[in-house]
Image (cartoon, rainbow, N blue to C red):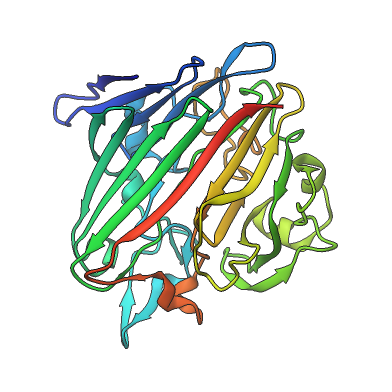
Amino acid sequence: MIATSSDAGGASLPEDQLFTLRNADGMRVTISERGAALVSWWAPDRYGRQSDVVLGYASPASYRDNQVYMGAVVGRWANRIAHGRFVLDGAAVQVAVNDRGNHLHGGPQGFHALRWDGEAQPQEVLLRLRSPAGEAGFPGNVQIQVRYRLGDDGALSIDYEAVTDAPTPLNLTAHPYFNLNGGSADIGDHMLQVDADYYLATDATGIPLGMAPVGGTPFDFRRPAAIGARLCWPDEQLRLAGGFDHCYAIRGRADGQGGALREVARVVDPGSGRCLQVSTTEAGLQFYSGNYLDGVRGRAARPYARYDGFCLEAGAFPDQLNSELAATAILRPGQVYRQSTVYRISLQ
């Protein structure tokens, strides 16, 4: 079932429609045209009590100044590009820089800040966006569409498609912040498991230095481990990032190539019994522990604090455009960019 509403937001601005999807078990998710953002996700705990398990702003209008990418679809390039520079078909390209001298998540006016054209369809929401050539410095006119679908099994499918009229990098992802206890505490007790033997170690600005094995480090989530306990490890990588903000190379996909949709991560909140399973076609999975949420005003009475939410963002590797895997991240005329990620919430 789909319901729609509007955010008036000001006479000079177009209204941003909100779309709500519901399943047979009473679960519901709301999506905004602004940033194609996942605004809320109400799900029951083991006692049947409903809570919102994603962080969000109190007002839909706040998504117009979404500095932390709350719930949004980000692009053209999710994650970072060193110095905002790369070479495409022999020509140097400079794109917007907005994070310690690097490009991050499409720049200050990336897809997260734009109004998408939303449409309610039977059992799904379709959002479309046109990104003109030169936007944030990227070449090519790109047409993008994203489909949200909520199944009765608690699976929220996000399917992306895009085409271009000139070669251009493209790397899209969703940026919801999850807290499976519904905000009653931080994410420290959440048990995380990631199907990856390697992660990308980074410098002080978040740019990858190279693949590193997870064994013997706080990044080893091949077996479930509590996020909070790992945040306390005396590790230089955690110190530099203020927590986790690192990309995992999904097992079998270290060559940067995507594959069939399969489960790559799982998070369990022991208190509520909620379990989040993440499946994707992508090679990389960025685990971000909400290191810069401190002071962000959301729906709660108090501002959010560090580690109040976590993100698992599926996509290409950060700064892949400046690596030997660059060619795999270029969309060319006649090709169709496709990506699928599924977040499923169930009970343990």
Q: Could you tell me residue 6's position as x and y percent?
A: 24, 21
Quarter occupied by the C terminus: top right
On screen, residue 327 versus residue 239, left or right, reads: left
**Count of marks, rendered view:** 0
In the rendered view, tell whether residue 202 sits above or below residue 115. below
Q: Could you tell me residue 153's position as x and y percent?
A: 53, 28
Residue 17 quadrant: top left
Q: Residue furthest bottom?
A: 90
- Between 280 and 247, the residue placed more toward the observer is 280
Quarter occupied by the N terminus: top left
Q: Is residue 106 visible?
A: no
Q: Is residue 17 visible?
A: yes
The residue depicted at 27 percent of the width and 72 percent of the height is 332
Residue 52 quadrant: top right
Q: Could you tell me residue 242's position as x and y percent?
A: 68, 51
- Between 185 and 127, the residue placed more toward the observer is 127
The residue depicted at 33 percent of the width and 40 percent of the height is 147
On screen, residue 79 versus residue 336, left or right, reads: right
On screen, residue 156 versus residue 140, left or right, reads: right
Q: Could you tell me residue 193's position as x and y percent?
A: 72, 47
On screen, residue 160 versus residue 117, left or right, reads: right
Q: Residue furthest left?
A: 12
In the rendered view, tell whether residue 81 sits above or below residue 273. below
The residue depicted at 32 percent of the width and 49 percent of the height is 111
The residue depicted at 39 percent of the width and 75 percent of the height is 85
Residue 61 quadrant: top left
